[in-house]
Image: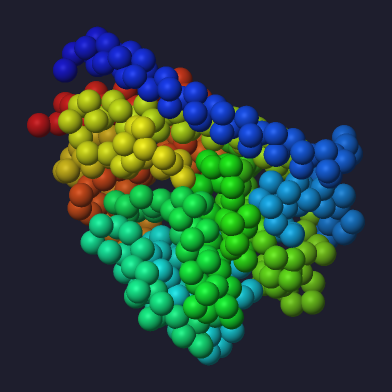
Amino acid sequence: MQANILESLANEVETEVQAVYRDIEAMAMKNHQRVLEGFHLARTADYHLRGTTGYGYNDAGRDALEKIYAHVFGAEAALVRGQIVSGTHAIAIALFGLLRPGDELLAVQGSPYDTLEEIIGKRGNASGSLKDFGVSYNQVELTSGGTLAWDNIKKALNPRTKVVLIQRSRGYAWRPPLTMQELQKLVGFIREHAPHVYVFVDNCYGELVENLEPTVVGADLAAGSLMKNPGGGLAPTGGYVVGRKDLVEAASHRWTAPGIGAEVGPSLDVQRLLMQGIFLAPHVVAEALKGAVFAARLFERLGFKVSPAFDEPRSDIIQAIALETPERLVAFCRGIQGASPVDAHALPEPDYMPGYEDDVIMAAGTFVQGASLELTADAPLRQPYAVYLQGGLSKEYVRIGVINAAKNVLQVK
């Protein structure tokens, strides 16, 4: 297909999706209002934007940031620290804070995201996994239609079950993400049949996509990365845990050490970026969602299967596109990389990545290493050779990248 024909199709797509864009903007307005309320409740001042060093005792800016996060997520407390290096790290902190030897961790949506499997001890031989500490694991598979298997969840819940792990996003799976309405129903179901368990949500990729967050609809604890949605494209590092005050405290004692918890942890020189990041996050997430809508409709028009469809409800920023062959998958990722502001000259290749079972290809020409919200595309090399596109600091940037990816894909025989 000639480049001008593809540009013409892209213009048609932009016209088609305008109503969906307006809905996203309405959602962003509500989320931005809530974030701003958090800043006002924390009485944010100029001195809160300055960092601290050493132990970080009495870090007023850090405390204000955690008050903002607690409000945004409708939680009793928050742990928001630059020393948390990823979403996987934040999730590990939470799980090790909640679970003890003899407890059982139950996943209710099949296998969790690849990088969690070694933390659990489900795969690999990583030292210090939950399995090493005597925590058992069980999982309930989704139905053939990709929905929750309610009867099987009920059967799996037992007196040893201490934590139910719920993943909000689709991860590397061809299934819809969990909406907040569905999560609320699931939490109620778990409370009815096993009131003794903690409900923990891997919230990565889902923050500020809807007007509610997991801790508002009943989850005890949720965690994620600042290099994804809540960092607003500015956070250079960091992660968070939000939820019940006692459980956030328990997680903090795994983050540092028992007896120290959240009392230490300097904000260094990143405090202003973390503050400004969460402030901008509703807008940047909206831009990423618009980009995902555009990508979905463009590739639908080109004859590819996508999930979700451009006009379907969304609960995360991930757009899955089934490219059907490994050659197309590589071509797509190289197209995204080639349109990036950083390392555009690099050619992504599938390779082993720590924590993943299959070889993975990743396109990420980002200002912050691993910052999915900026615009990335990655996938494990397995059927249906689906690429998982996420992020976009601006809708215009996503359009440029997606068109470049489409050009590459269409050149593959």
Residue 52 seen by the camera:
no
Quarter the N terminus occupies: top left
Residue at the outermost front position: 192
Q: How many marks?
A: 0
- Residue 205 left/right relative to 313: right
Which sits in the foreground, 17 or 382? Answer: 17
Determine whether 205 is above or below 214 in the image. Answer: above
Looking at the image, which residue sits at the far left? Answer: 413
- In the depicted view, which residue is nearer to us: 311 or 369? 311
Q: Is residue 199 visible?
A: yes
> Vertical placement of 268 versus 393: above or below?
below
Write the residue at 45% across / 80% down. Answer: 157
Q: Position of residue 260 (x, y in %)?
A: 79, 72
Q: Is 71 rendered above or below residue 113?
A: above
Residue 241 position in % (x across, y down)? 65, 59
Q: Position of residue 54 (x, y in %)?
A: 83, 57
Q: What residue appears at the point 70 percent right and 39 percent down from the top-left corner?
A: 34
Residue visible at 52% across and 74% down?
192
Task: Give the color scheme: rainbow, by chain, secondary structure or one colour.
Answer: rainbow
Q: Is residue 194 rendered to the left or right of residue 361? A: right
Q: Position of residue 171 (x, y in %)?
A: 39, 53
- In the rendered image, the quadrant that contains the C terminus is top left
